[in-house]
Image (spheres, coloured by chain):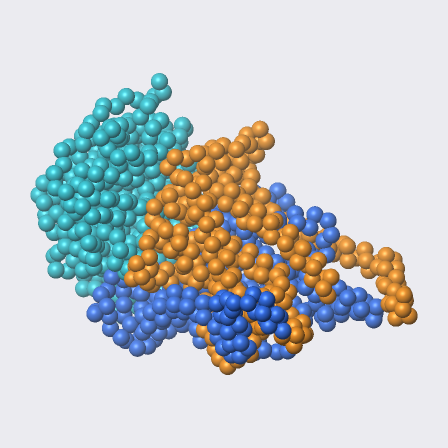
Amino acid sequence: MSFAQKTTASQQPNAWLRFKRWCGCRFEDETLFGYVLLVPTILVVLGLIGYPFLTSVYYSFTDKTIGMDASQIKFIGFDNFASLVNDRIYRKALVNTFNFTVTAVIAKILLGLMMALTLNEVKRFRRLFRATFLLPWVIPTSLSVLGWLWMFDPQFSVITHLLRILGLASETTSIPWKADPQLAMASVQVVNIWRGTPFFGMMILASLMTVPQELYEAATVDGANWLQRFWYITFPCIRPVLIVAMLFSFVRTMGDFQIVWILTNGGPFDSTQLIATRAYQVAIQGAKETGLGAAIAVSLFPFLLPVILLYLRYARRED
Amino acid sequence: MTAKGKAEQKPRRLYDLLRGLTGHFTLRNLVLSLSLLFFLFFTLLPVGWMVLTSFRSDQAIDMHPFEIHLQDLSLDQYVKLLTDPYFPFPKWMLNSIIVSLTSSLISIAIGGIAAYSLGRLRYRGGSAIGLSIFSTYLLPPVLLFIPLRVLAARLGLPSNSVWTLTLTYLTFQVPFIAWTLSSYFQGIPTELVDAARIDGASRLKAMFLIDVPLVLPGIISVFFFAFTLSWGEYMYALTFMSQKSAYTVPLGMVNEAQIGDIYFWGKLMAGAVLGSVPVVIVYSFLMDYYLAGMIAGAVKG
Amino acid sequence: MKKLSRRDFLRWTALGSAGLVASACSKEIEVTKIIKETIVEKETEVVTPTAMAEQMFGGSLDLILRHSFIPEMNAIQENQLAQWGEAHGVDVSVSSPGEWREMIASGIESKTGDIGETFQEEALIYGDALADVSDICEELGSKYGGWYELAEKVGKDDNGVWRTIPRAFTAHLINYRTDYFGEVGYPDGCKTYDEYLDAATKLKEAGLPLVGNTVSQTGPNDSASWTYSVLWSHGGSEVDENGKVAINSEGTRKALEYIQKLAEVSSPNITGFDEGANNRAFLGGEISATQNATSIYYNAKDEVLENMNHMRYPEGPAGWVMFTEMNTLSLFGHSKNLEAGKAVLRWLMDEEQLIPLVQIGITFYTPLLRGYDDLPSMPWNVDPKLAVAKGLAHGGNVTGYPLPPSAKSAKAYQNRTIVNMFARVIIGDASIDEAMKTAEEDLKAVYEA
């Protein structure tokens, strides 16, 4: 109705208005509209990232090394993957990656939830608290990790120093943050959790804020206690965002590189070696085997299948 | 006031009474305070140490790291950082701002409409496309930087250009935005749009005038995250920027303050602090809109 | 005027002869404040660069060079290249990021860039992606007294073609405190590994700062330099002359036993040191010796500077074999300006250009041409604390010893197999036999795949 009014008012059918009307009519079709909206994304994503992604996957089936001419590349099928099975360091990296990812993501979810709930309740100095808690995420990783490198220094660690002041650590021996296999893994996990918690915190907080207050009030009137309110109101409302954040974090944590690379370089004796760092070592350092390195990264795909399935199940439209 | 209204008023007063009286209230406060303290410690211990270091001289840091004399604190590291003729830190800030801001805005535009499509509209193949967008994250950037460089060379994209870098940043921002915002879009009620459509509004109108404002907090959060992700990005910046004047902040700082096996902690931390300031500013700026969006939302609710 | 140390004397001489004062005839270059200050402090003669060949090449050249812990080194090179570029009509640009090797790899893959400073045996792995530079290398060899064997091993590929110009290697020496070592009877350092162990033991007994030789995957380069040298000097090696894995041997056992004994009297932190931690520990007076390039010496001040000196890695039962860290200049085969590239490489390797770099590099760059050994302006002939670096390349080897370096030896090095073998024994994570077995398994996967 509004369209009809507009056109009669301006006498001459404006080309722009006609285009708009045409769009309006065309876009009534849900499918077409849906696809059109996706076009820029597909262009950017599949165009820019598709080539690197697909070539890397392709290389994982070849014997390519850096500098090898295209004509010299040989297709070797699953040979790379087969050799990985016998690679002791790869197997260790795989186990470490799962250990690292699962632990870190669970910790981040729990802490992030706690952070969001806490921030939601805070009434005074809201902005200050939120800005402060955000800092670990905000400081560029390449710089904050260097800060942690120093904080885990065998001699000059401020953490050891504080523990000594509190009487929890001996004065003479230094804590081997990077030299002990378990401690080293814990150290890199702590840095990852420290950096990643604000992400969950803020995402969940954003979602928490969209939960209508009346629901809470009604529930309290009905006699629900804090836990029940959380479980039946809060949780279902934030669940979509929680799942998205979890999937995103899971995939990113699995590919995490910088923390381990700078802090421990995979050590001590590969106790913190991850798939991403191993792939880098093989593909870009060492013998510069692009194919083998790509295979290492691609080998994670089957293990990410549950994550993909979860995404698919969740992405199906539910009303 | 109607009879219904009166009935609604009574439970509210009762609720307030309950809140004021029960011990439940104080316990909640205690837990809240503990939690706040924990997070303050969790955040501020490392950050505080880093910030403190940025105010100390190189000698103090190396010679007696744990003896801190208040009178020795100074802004020297910051001055050195900002006035170094060989390393243009202000230029790096400018580069970072341009790249992060531009890429985030473009990504929101592109990814936002894709998110709408994935989250609100029904059509065949939606899951498949969503999945392929998601799967671009499965390979870590540490491996992708070389093929991306090859692609850029083939496309003739110039190195040392903030626009080339902006383009590459889209590759990890757009999927994230499309993906995250789609869940926000999924979560909003459909009644308003249905009502509007019955009134004759086109899909485009409905999208921009109704649904988008409803997820504004989500858009703001996601914009912020995209901005932060690109602000701290290192690998692609390293790959495409070889001239010092083209560096972004993380790239420049690491190369200036870490030379071989020598680390200049004071400078590094000063760079970390200064490098975080723009992001915090953006965040505070957005918070205003955020809260405004919340209030508007509450009224609408 | 403050007392000049030999180290600083070298620096100023170098800056003068690099023509950094003579900026009038060259493009405006930003130089660090440090250089400006040091030039102002001491009067240096203006030395104009030698007349260069007049040929104009046009086009552009992009170079990726190694990032040195001595900022002046990068400044000098950039200045030299700018002058050369202007004289030959070439648009030269230089970058020296911390990850210079990764940038070379990406340059080679994307066929961008012209010249890169490759590391260790990388040039051999890139193979024919790099241009043939035999003419330049033969010329340099004959002009400057011949290459060290090490240079030929690293520079020539299987067909005897020079794929890269071995520019210089980074001297790794044991930095030690003369005062503490003097107290236990070794003021001039130790000649053999047994003497070193003796000194370390006595230091511990006397309650003096312990030795701290890094053996850690977290500090891979320093550790590799030490562990490979210990291994080879005791008769062990990854492979034998026929290419078969031979790590499980008497020589390796001796090396591991030695390291075990040394670790008992060393600082407990050696398995956790990252690349910079041993610097910090030494400069802070926490340890009395560690293996390192001269980055410690460069940063030392006052008490530490006065009381420190360098010694070569000790001799072992199987002689003196040392791990060397090579920097080689490579011309990319895909470069669009090959002629200019060759010309600039030839020019860079000329003594006029190389000498200031070596002087200021205080053995961070040690040429592999014999002619430089006796040159009076060289750091080892000027500064007595660096005297041991003379002729250091003679007993040097890159990975793969006793075979020439290859992609396989590079891979074994990257896997940190040797470093971890030693580290596990030190920490007690594995017995000597177990550690050797694991190393054998890993090496077999690489060499006999």
Q: Which chain appears blue? A: A
Residue at the spot 33% in from the left edge and 72% down from the top edge: A58
Whole-percent x, y for residue A37 in the image: 50, 70
Image point (50%, 57%), residue name: B105
Q: How many marks?
A: 0
Q: Is residue C47 above or below residue A30?
A: above
Q: In which quarter of the image is residue C299?
A: top left
Residue C208 x/y as whole percent: 44, 36
Left or right position of C179 against A180: left
In-image side of C172 versus A275 (left or right): left
* Residue A27 picture location, percent across and down: 53, 75
Viewer-proximal residue among A89 and C1 = C1
Looking at the rendered image, the quarter that the C terminus of chain B falls into is bottom right
Percent x, y of residue C445: 30, 68
- Could you say which chain is coloured orange in the image? B
Of residues A99 and B258, the one nearer the viewer is: B258
Instruction: Tell which residue pokes out farthest to the front in this image.
Output: A11
- Whether residue A243 is visible here, answered yes or no, is no
Q: Residue at x 21, y 38 (%)?
A: C86
